[in-house]
Image: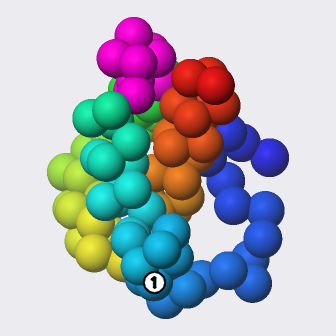
Amino acid sequence: MGMFEDDDNDYGYDDYKEDFMGRTPKSSYFEIAKTANQNVVEHELEAVFRRLAVAERMLEERGLDEELEREIQNTMIDKDIDDRTATVFIDLVSSIVTKCE
């Protein structure tokens, strides 16, 4: 299972809306990122961007054409993508908090 994959499929995006004491995973990340050790925050954020760069390169190597680019744009608003984005924020918070302890 990948670094940012949610292994608990019973925990959907709607469940994320009121977690973390009424905060969303995104708002929790930004709150933690402001107060945590900035070297740790930068390192974890760089890891996410590197992962994105790898994914983009893999797409390009497989022939990222106009049709695939349109499909990517159409998928930007999608419940599964929302869930995965929330999982990325949760993983970031977890990694930052763990490394700052």
Image position, residue 4 (x, y; %): 61, 46
| Residue 33 highlighted magenta (yes or no) | no
Asked if residue 42 is positioned above or below residue 22 in the image, the reply reads: above
Horizontal arrangement in the rendering, residue 78 relative to residue 12 (left or right): left
Q: Does residue 84 show up?
A: yes
- Given residues 49 and 22, the one toward you in this image is 22
Q: Residue at x 67, y 39 (%)?
A: 3
Query: For residue 101, what is the image quadrant?
Result: top right
Secondary element type, mark 1: loop
Query: For residue 59, what is the image quadrant?
Result: top left
Image position, residue 49 (x, y; %): 37, 27
Asked if residue 30 is positioned above or below residue 16 in the image, the reply reads: above
Q: How many labels does the image show?
A: 1
**Residue at the disc numbered 1:** 18
Please, what is the three-letter code of the amino acid marked with disc 1?
A: Glu
| Residue 44 highlighted magenta (yes or no) | yes
Image position, residue 21 (x, y; %): 48, 74
Asked if residue 98 is positioned above or below residue 29 in the image, the reply reads: above
- Given residues 46 and 38, the one toward you in this image is 38
Q: Residue at x 69, y 61 (%)?
A: 6
Neighbor class of circle 1 (other Cα within 10 Å; few <14, some 14-19, many 20+) is few
Q: What stretch is highlighted in magenta?
A: 36-45
Q: Does residue 50 show up?
A: no
Image position, residue 80 (x, y; %): 50, 75
Q: Residue at x 57, y 35 (%)?
A: 97
- Given residues 36 and 87, the one toward you in this image is 36
